[in-house]
Structures are given as C-alpha cells and as structure tokens.
Amino acid sequence: MGRADLQLHSDLGDGLSSLDAILDSAEQVGLDVIALTDHDDIHGAFALRDLAARRSSPVQVITGVEDFFDRRQTVAQIAVKLEICLTQGDPTPARTPTTARGAP
C-alpha cells in the first residue's frame, strides 16, 4: 500500500515551504502521492506537478485546492475535474471561483 499526504500548503499560498522543499521532503520520507491544496488558488498545484515531472520524481502529484464555502466548513478538494475545467477555458486561470466563499 502506498503512502500519501493529500493536504499540503506551499509558500505560494498560506504555507511556509517552497515547492522544491515540499517535493524534496516527500521524496526523502518515501511518499508515493501528494496533493498541494493551497487556499483558493490552484497555480501552485500545477507548478508542483510540473516540477515533479521535470525532475522525474517518483512522487505522484495530484492537483488540488482548498476552498472556503462558509464560516463553518472548509472542504479540501482533489481537483482533477477542476483542473480540466479551468485549463480548457483558460490555461492560466487567475484563481478558483470564490463567489461562494463566506465572509472571513
């Protein structure tokens, strides 16, 4: 059975680690799959996926995003469908839709 961390945050979002550091750490501890789920922005996830491909990393990167839907609930979404929708219409979407986000 593989090892995974499906909710990571980078310094491109609200985390502290660079994409290189995240991928380095995942490789060092032997993770098979990771998902970058920065808040409200999927760009870092695409960049991490591309970095892993350029490095021929053994770590599979799932693109994701964490959206806030209301004050009480946060949902981390693995965004395979979201990636397809965003890249078909706009290969460099600025942000994921935030109109459903509740007030902070």
Image: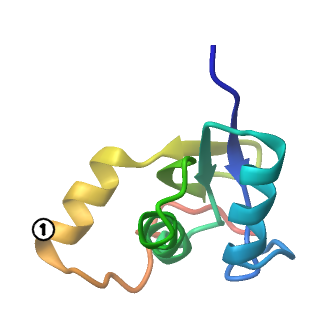
Q: Is residue 75 above or below residue 92?
A: above
The colour mode here is rainbow
- Quadrant position of residue 10: bottom right
Q: Position of residue 36 (x, y in %)?
A: 61, 58
Q: Considering depth in this image, is 104 or 60 the residue closer to the camera?
A: 60
Q: Which residue is mark 1?
A: 88
Q: Residue at x 57, y 48 (%)?
A: 59
Q: Residue at x 65, y 51 (%)?
A: 70
* Neighbours of disc 1 within 10 Å: few (<14), some (14-19), many (20+): few
- Is the C terminus in the top left, top right, bottom left or bottom right quadrant? bottom right
- Quadrant position of residue 75: top right
Helix or strand or loop: what does disc 1 sit on?
A: helix
Q: Position of residue 7 (x, y in %)?
A: 70, 47
Q: Considering depth in this image, is 96 or 29 the residue closer to the camera?
A: 29
Q: Amino acid at mark 1?
A: Gln
Q: Residue at x 30, y 85 (%)?
A: 92
Q: Considering depth in this image, is 16 or 1 the residue closer to the camera?
A: 1
Please indicate whether residue 69 sits to the left or right of residue 3 in the image.
Answer: left
Please indicate whether residue 42 sits to the left or right of residue 29 in the image.
Answer: left
Please indicate whether residue 86 sits to the left or right of residue 46 in the image.
Answer: left
- Is the N terminus in the top left, top right, bottom left or bottom right quadrant? top right
Q: Position of residue 6 (x, y in %)?
A: 65, 41
Please indicate whether residue 27 sits to the left or right of residue 51 in the image.
Answer: right
Q: Position of residue 102 (x, y in %)?
A: 64, 61
Q: Is residue 80 above or below residue 84?
A: above
Q: Residue at x 82, y 71 (%)?
A: 15
